Image (cartoon, rainbow, N blue to C red):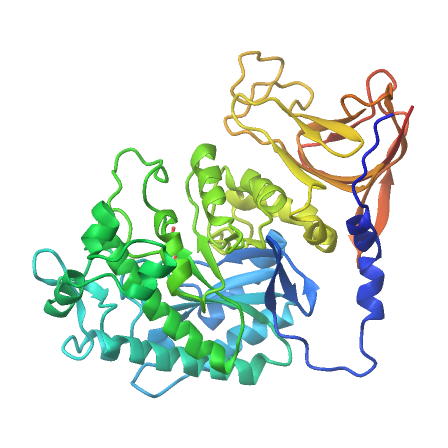
Amino acid sequence: MSRTSRSPRVWRVVRVCGLLACAALPAVAQTKPIPQLVRKGDKFTFLVDGKPFIMLGGQVGNFSALPDRMEGARESFRAMHLNTVEYPVYWNVIEPAEGRFDFSGFDQILRGIRAQGLRAVILWFGTWKNGAMDWAPNWVKADPARFPRVIGPGGKPIRVLSPHSRANLEADRKAYVAMMRHLREIDEADRTVIMVQVENEPGLLGSPRDYSAESNRLFAGPVPEKLAASLKTKPGSWKEVFGREAEEAFSAYAVSGYINEVAAAGKEIYPLPTYVNVWNGGYGTNDNWERYDRPGETYPSGGAVAHMLDLWKANAPAIDAIASDIYHQSPITYLKILNAYRRPDNPLLIVETGRGIACRAFFYAIADYSAIGFGPFGVDGAGGGLRPDMAAIAADFRLFQSTIPVIAELQGTPHLKAAVEETGIGARNLIFGKYDVLVRFNPPGRAPAGTIAQPAAAAPAEPSARVMVAELGLDEFLVMGFDSSVEWRPAQGSDYTAAQFLEVGEGVYENGVWKQTVAGSTSQGDYAGPTVRLPAQGALMRVKLMQY
Ligand code: DGJ
């Protein structure tokens, strides 16, 4: 008889986690613990209020982080089922004149988010926003002699502050530190803000590197010894060490060092987790074939793109996560990026994504890549409601939100897996300890997207089926998803003939405890195996089984 010998320890933890959370509450209210990213082995856990947290984020539009607009977006946040709002803090708004800070709008926005019971991630639009300097204050923009810009290949300044300038760094650092100090004063007790994005899609858009006299001198010199040692390369010039990527690596070194100093100074005041987001680029990450991919032209040079990730990790230890923005629609490209950014030294975090594939990518990201957070961009774009193109992601978040304590515990273990429809892929078999779980992307009446067979209903242009299966115990599963059927069989090679339901029900978790809201029939699967159907609007189900 074939039985698994895997330890059910993690399952016990999952079952009692709700109880423990209550038991651990101190008798006297204390300051909430600071949010933290904790690494154990290869697994990262994001602790908020001391408990595992998965960020169901939504980023507002670039011009939305003003008090009245944020107030007007409340309904969008609710309709999206967010637990976290991501929004910018503009350098030119908080420091309109050098050394004079105005946090009135900052406070108002934060109070509004807190009143909604949501968490926040603030995005520092400082030196860099999409590889340019557009959100720097006018006193910086207007004084290029003091705050030098990148000199492009044609010898002329471009719309980017130079990462080699100490004056630029100091001005940004002072403002960032002032913001972090103020944030600590007004939010330390509540911990509304749980993470900080330092700059936005940094790098040099318009030039592979700075061609100023000072920068030319540095580029002609050797790669700093410490960097070469961390990357385990031979010493040499930038060209000798990095070849074709020399200018990009030179910029990445300058940009990552600059941002590291800004982030480290902020952490000295208020050590919240930090991350840097990325305008993607580089080999195989571009599915826009009308363009080609060159640093400084189609994406900012010096950002933490996949092929610069080792360098960034070595040179920016004050940054806890590198988070690629993913707007690509090809599943090949999307998964390639998830693969590149989920590393033993980097948790997967997606703070900007969107459209078609994103609702399916959520399942891959959470179940197969242990993402600590997922956030579509532009959630407030519908004039106060739910953007139609966000409805599918909102449905994901609605289904998923109550399971966070359970799923966060199972991430990174073999007990959590996703099955996602892609064009031409009609089913997936997920292998667990005692059972093979067959997920078919075949809601009644239609074949999977992109297949030849076309029954009654035509396949939708965009695949829609997506499922997450969590093994809660040897004979117990949590299943959530859309547009699919899920069937259990004894594991291949075991001596059992078939599986049978003992309990089936739809429900939600309340404070970590399962509450069944709709009972399912245990006789489901009379003529086939035990099967549950996940409808187009989605369902969260728990099943208990036996084998005979
Ligand atoms: C990526 C940037 O990081 C965002 O701020 C925003 O401009 C989006 N692109 C728009 O698609």
In the rendered image, the residue lying farthest to the bottom is 100
- Residue 126, position in %: x, y? 34, 70
**502 relative to 80 in the view: left or right:** right
Q: Image height check: is 116 above or below 96?
A: above
**360 relative to 48 in the view: left or right:** left
The reply to whether residue 295 is visible in this rendering is: no
Of 288 and 313, nearer the camera is: 313
Of 227 and 484, nearer the camera is: 227
> Whereabouts is ligand 1, in terms of quadrant?
bottom left
In the rendered image, the residue lying farthest to the front is 234
* Quarter of the figure that contains the C terminus: top right
Q: Image height check: is 357 above or below 201?
A: above
Of 403 and 60, nearer the camera is: 403
**347 relative to 444 in the view: left or right:** left
> Number of labelled discs?
0
- Residue 267, position in %: x, y? 48, 77
Determine the residue positioned at 36% across, 74% down: 91
